[in-house]
Amino acid sequence: MSLIGSLSSGVTGLQTFSKDLEVIGNNIANVNTTAFKSGSLGFTESFSNTLRASQPGNGGAVSNVQASQIGSGVKISGINVNFNQGALNTTGQATDLGVSGDGYFLVKDGSGVSYATRDGNFRWDDQGYLVNATGMRVQGLTGDSVTAPTDVVGDIKRDNSPLASGATLQSIAIDRAGDVVQFYSDGSNATVGQVLLQRFSQPSALMKHGDGLYTSLTNAGPSGTDGIFSSVANVTAAADYTAGTGANGTIEAGTLEQSNVDLTAEFANMITAQRSFQANARVVTVSDTVLDDIVNLKR
């Protein structure tokens, strides 16, 4: 029984540490991925076979009896994501947005499904909407025109229509509070929208969707008056989601958040995982050798 146990324990080690190497390899592969959050594998012991249960003492000369248990290996307790902020790198692109502090951008796909992201690699599309690399529209307070901006939450959109004076649009800037400000040829300017930020009290509950996007937003404990700010319909409630307000981070235009992967730590973890895999492989081969000796006892 002990030999079979050592074999199975070694196999659980091989399976677990191979997954550890997968996680480390994924971290290293994404060392240059915008706003990537590194992961780490958690370990816990597997079920223990009880040979003898513990017994209390009788109050006399006989002391309490200790339990005798043999473990059956290791298993994965979870894959933890490090949500610490990565460094902000200057790009010089006005539509590149980095968050300094806490908060996520919300984007919506064509079917209206919301995603959270820290990847602020945005651009203006041919319809005037602020979108991410896959064409999903950035959410915030929107304005229908430069003369009558609204306080409705929706797709951020620029306004290309000229002013009554005939002045034309020259440039667009997004400030640290997320205000989308348009500048005109006559020197005037107008705010036509505001990029908002969504915070989460339990970001570890977010699910990676790919392309720097996260799902399961309601499970992550969205912070603010209305939870997910896509339900906000007025500027007063939206104050909870304004960059630079309360615990919200600020929006830094012209920057992108870098991956938070620490290559030095990852290579050290890789060495540990590799040696652990080798040690468990050795347990399997030694158990096989002993089994071979037992089989060949009678010759």
Image (spheres, grey):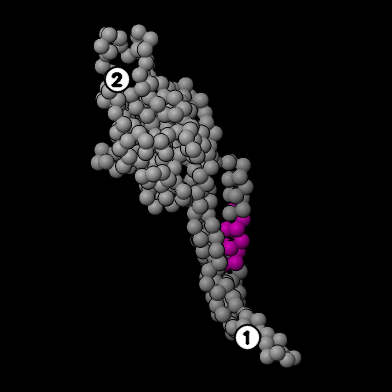
Residue 176 seen in the current view: yes
Q: Amino acid at mark 1?
A: Gln
Q: Residue at x 29, y 33 (%)?
A: 152
**Helix, strand or loop status at disc 1:** loop
Q: Relative to 74, is 135 above or below?
A: above
Quadrant location of residue 51?
A: bottom right
Q: Amino acid at mark 2?
A: Val
Indicate whether residue 196 is drawn in magenta: no
Q: Residues within 10 Å of mark 1 (few under 14, many from 20)?
A: few
Circle on res. 113: none
Pick whichever of labels 2 and 1 is earlier in the sequence.
1
**Helix, strand or loop status at disc 2:** loop
Image coords of residue 150 (percent x, y)? 29, 28
Q: Residue at x 57, y 58 (%)?
A: 277
For the record, the magenta segment spans 274-284
Q: Are marks 2 and 1 in contact (CB under 8 Å)?
A: no
Q: Relative to 251, is 48 above or below?
A: below
Image coords of residue 85 (percent x, y)? 53, 39
Image coords of residue 101 (percent x, y)? 51, 37
Left or right: residue 14 versus residue 169 is: right
Q: Residue furthest front?
A: 236
Left or right: residue 58 versus residue 209 is: right
Q: Residues within 10 Å of mark 2 (few under 14, many from 20)?
A: many
Circle on res. 146: 2
Circle on res. 55: 1
Indicate whether residue 275 is drawn in magenta: yes
